[in-house]
Image (spheres, rainbow, N blue to C red):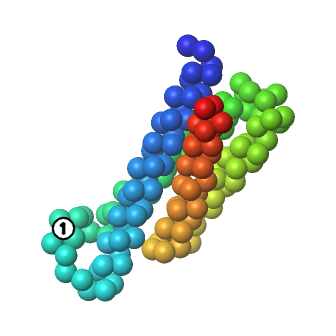
Amino acid sequence: MPTSLVHILLAILTTGVFAFAGVQALLLALQDRLLHQKSHIHWLDKLPPLERMESFLFQIIWGGFILLTVLLLSSFYYYHDAVWSHLLSKTLLACISWIIFVVLILGRRLLGWRGKKALYFTAVGIGIVLLLYFSAYLTRL
């Protein structure tokens, strides 16, 4: 299988996992907000508890982070010449998103980050990953 095809499939998988994490983060933020407003909405009772939702979000983030790490390492290995020439901006954005997820994971593990702070870091990191994916897609059109 050609390296470019592996790279593309890995990028699609990574983006898909982070997009799923984004949907989970939105659902978690909505659930948190409705609980704080003491709103009683029927479907809110059907969701798992907030802690379990947050734990699931971080499991998804861990999976996406591992995939993003493999994607970056394979990019540097297979496309090292292109990474430093015409793909420098995308490489920097990918590295920034990787750093954001490292800070998020370490903040959660070492500092106990939860709630809004964790959701903000998640939103920024996922936003950058989606920007990278769709910018790569749009440049191919």
Specify whether 137 is left or right of 35. right
Q: In the rendered image, which quarter contains the C terminus?
A: top right
Category of crowding for the residue at label 1, using alpha-carbon neighbours closer than 10 angstroms: few (below 14), some (14–19), many (at least 20): few
Q: Is residue 71 visible?
A: no
Towards the viewer: 52 or 27: 27
Q: Image point 43% across, 53% down: which residue?
A: 21
User: Residue 134 location, x and y as percent?
Assistant: 57, 43
SS class of the residue under badge 1? helix
Residue at the outermost top position: 1
Q: Image point 57% across, 21% down: which residue?
A: 5
Towards the viewer: 108 or 28: 28
- Quadrant of residue 39 within the rendered picture: bottom left
User: Residue 114 location, x and y as percent?
Assistant: 47, 72
78 in relation to 105, above or below: above
139 in relation to 122, above or below: above
Specify whether 113 is left or right of 85. left
User: Residue 124 location, x and y as percent?
Assistant: 58, 61
78 in relation to 106, above or below: above
Specify whether 37 is left or right of 11. left
Q: How many marks?
A: 1
Q: Which residue is mark 1?
A: 43
Q: Image point 58% across, 36% down: which residue?
A: 137
24 in relation to 1, above or below: below
Residue at the outermost front position: 141
Q: Amino acid at mark 1?
A: Trp
User: Residue 138 location, x and y as percent?
Assistant: 61, 39
Q: Is residue 118 visible?
A: yes
Residue at the outermost bottom position: 37
Q: In the rendered image, which quarter contains the N terminus?
A: top right
Towards the viewer: 106 or 87: 87
